Image: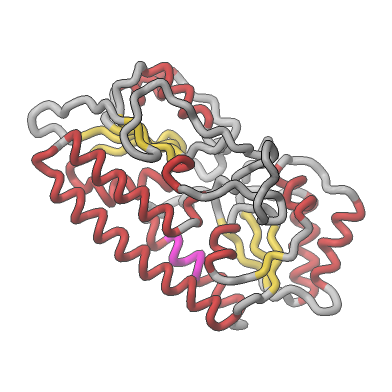
Amino acid sequence: MPFRRSGTALVALATLTLAGCGAGSTTAPAAPSGDAPLTVVTSTNVYGSIAQAVGGNRVTVTSLINDPAADPHSYESTPADAAKVAGANVVLYNGGGYDDFMQRLVQSAGGKATVVNVTQLSGLAPTDASGGAAPAGQSSFNEHFWYSLPTMQKVATQLATDLGAADSANAAQFTSNAQAFNAKVADLLTKEQAIGAAHSGARVAITEPVPGYLIEGAGLDDVTPPAFTKAVEEDTDPPAAVLQQTLALFTGDPVRALILNAQTETPTTTQVEQAAQTAGVPVVKVTETLPAGVNDYVSWMGSEIDAVANALNGR
């Protein structure tokens, strides 16, 4: 069953107890034994796939969340998870309130691993519900950073640095792998920007903020009432007036596409999807974690970008 989100992620930049070494990374790595590969533990398989791309055959990667139906917001870690984090050379997680269980595991592990917090690494500014600069004290992140392609390039570069620090003999390999990954992501950026060149300012609707960075990068205009996406993200029903405003996006001069989080399906999102289908508006389904059978970030994200382009191109 698709999961339903349990709450809105507010900025919760982790203040870790370990000594910092660079934005988003806290370094106190355990040395590998002989030729044994480094161990990397990530919160989700999205980050696990990136860690594998950078580490290659010199790392063993464990993603605590692999099930597309699991919700990182409400994931309950196990003693086995704690043992994996405690024994890791590098730990990679999203932060920003998305996977708080990882911060707790890191803190209980005693500070032996290099920790990469993507929220801290991203450098992205908090926004308000409409995407503008947030007032002081009211800031929140769209924490779905894996849709921010430049941020994923930062993650790869940081991983190469941290893995190289823990295994200097293979540092050049990690750097080369990260450069190759980042080149592929640069190709994705080109595809994303091509959408903007062809459809700059095209109006779209969403059910949740999940694809927000993709929409921004593609130069599209999300016209969904913020109160609607907030309600869906918080697993509540939007006010009736807000729902009607959202449904009205598919009448008259309808939006060009509906981008729907396939991992959060509710009666409300189903109603909106049906309104889009009735109006002949293309529906693009995106996900928060790698779908079953997919283990490569670049191919997954490429397919998501292609789906948006195809919808706007009328294919």
In the picture, measured across the screen, residue 95 lies left or right of residue 18, that is right
- Which residue is depicted at the point 12% across and 39% down? 168
Which residue is at the far front? 136
In the displayed structure, 8 sits above or below 273; it is: above
The picture quadrant where one finds residue 111 is top left
- Magenta stretch prevailing secondary structure: helix
In the displayed structure, 51 sits above or below 77; it is: below
Horizontal and vertical percent position of residue 36 = 14, 32
Q: Which of the image's four quarters has the C terminus? A: bottom right
Q: Nearer the viewer, residue 167 or 20?
A: 20
- Whether residue 225 is visible, yes or no, is yes
In the picture, measured across the screen, residue 264 lies left or right of residue 88, that is right
- Which residue is depicted at the point 43% across and 53% down? 151
Horizontal and vertical percent position of residue 69 = 56, 42
Q: How is the image coloured?
A: secondary structure
- Which residue is depicted at the point 58% across and 71% down? 219
The picture quadrant where one finds residue 307 is bottom right
Q: Which of the image's four quarters has the N terminus? A: top right
| Total marks placed | 0
- In the image, is residue 304 part of the stretch drawn in magenta? yes
- Whether residue 1 is visible, yes or no, is no
- In the image, is residue 141 part of the stretch drawn in magenta? no
Which residue is at the far right? 241
Horizontal and vertical percent position of residue 246 = 82, 61
Residue range corresponding to the magenta coloring: 300-305
- Which residue is depicted at the point 36% across and 25% down? 85
